[in-house]
Image (spheres, rainbow, N blue to C red):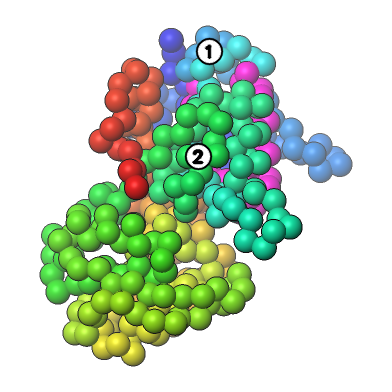
Amino acid sequence: MNLTILPGRAHPALAEAIARELGIHPAACELGRFPDGELHVAVGDSVRGHDVYLVQPTAPPVESHTLELLLLADACRRAGAARLTAVVPYFGYARQDRRARGREPVGARLVCDLLPVAGVERLVAVDLHSNALEGVAGIPLEHLSAVHILADALGPTAGSNAVVVAPDLGAAKLADRYARALGAPVALVHKARLSGAQVEVRGLTGDVRGRRALIVDDMITTGATVEAAIASLVEAGCTPGITVIATHAVLVENAVQRLRTAGVERLVVTDSVAQEGLPAWVQTVSLAPLLADAIGRLHGDESLAPLITHG
């Protein structure tokens, strides 16, 4: 069965890098809009009988990229693809895995339900905001981890006099994984979210005085959570020069400037979301080798155990 990498419009550079790692060329597709604004997609190369991997992070604009993913999947299914996997490094709506106030949708479940309708048989994602997505997905979900490649990017002395900080309770397990990789202790910031862009810190657990803080999270959107965590860390006596590590650099509004103003000296992220014009103090680590490894293993029906996130 032929292996095909099909790039969506959300991050064609990542799809091309994955294809290079695998020694193949990405398939062609046409993406545009009708005069009334409707999305139009068409697969340019034959995928009949192929093992197709559709690369499309659902980053902002989330609705457009999600619908494009569904349309491309349906096009591949109708064009005779033998097997179809959606590679969605950043999965939009992952935070909507439950109802917080009662009269709300469970957006993560809805998007997961739409994928098999479009023909997707398997989903590959990286460092999801919530592991609960595995429970709501009706198709197999391969949940990969970028922790080790990001920890390696920090350098051999990263754990020296450092403390790994979870900026909220949701990042506690992630912080534990970084702490094991770096051989560093863990601290936890207790926060309450006031709005989409405002949070309030209500406590700090762990000793950070005189230590270098490494704040870790799965994603940075507005930077509000990190900003609030830094204020509490500085007050608790951590050393100047904060490093922030996050898998997904969504970075909307003025997030980059907000982080710099708050005291971030170094930001280490992956290219799960397409970003341009980031300053020199932001280091981007490519997910292409990790995703290519996963795709190669899936194509060859081999185990993904070394790449999978547990807990």
Q: Quadrant of the N terminus?
A: top left
**Residue at image x 46%, y 34%?**
141
Q: Residue furthest right?
A: 36
- Magenta range is 52-77
75 in the magenta segment: yes
Question: In the rendered view, would you say 284 is above or below 110?
Answer: below
Q: How many numbered marks have been drawn onto this rendered protein structure?
A: 2
Label of residue 10 in the image: none
Secondary element under disc 2, as helix, strand or loop, is helix
**Residue at image x 44%, y 82%?**
202
Secondary element under disc 1, as helix, strand or loop, is loop
Label of residue 82 in the image: 1
Residue 277 visible in the shown view: no
The residue indicated by pointer 2 is 135
| Label 2 vs 1, first from the N-terminus | 1
> Observer-nearest residue: 304 or 137?
137
Residue 271: x percent and y percent? 42, 50
The amino acid marked with disc number 1 is Ala
> Observer-nearest residue: 27 or 252?
252
Mark 1, Cα crowd under 10 Å, few <14 / some 14-19 / many 20+, is: some
**Residue at image x 34%, y 25%?**
296
Q: Quadrant of residue 279?
A: bottom left
Distance of label 2 from label 1 (alpha carbons): 26 Å
The amino acid marked with disc number 2 is Gly
Q: Is residue 170 left or right of residue 57?
A: left
Question: In the rendered view, would you say 309 is above or below 294?
Answer: below
> Observer-nearest residue: 44 or 178?
178
Whether residues under marks 2 and 1 lie with C-beta atoms below 8 angstroms apart, the answer is no
Mark 2, Cα crowd under 10 Å, few <14 / some 14-19 / many 20+, is: few
279 in the magenta segment: no
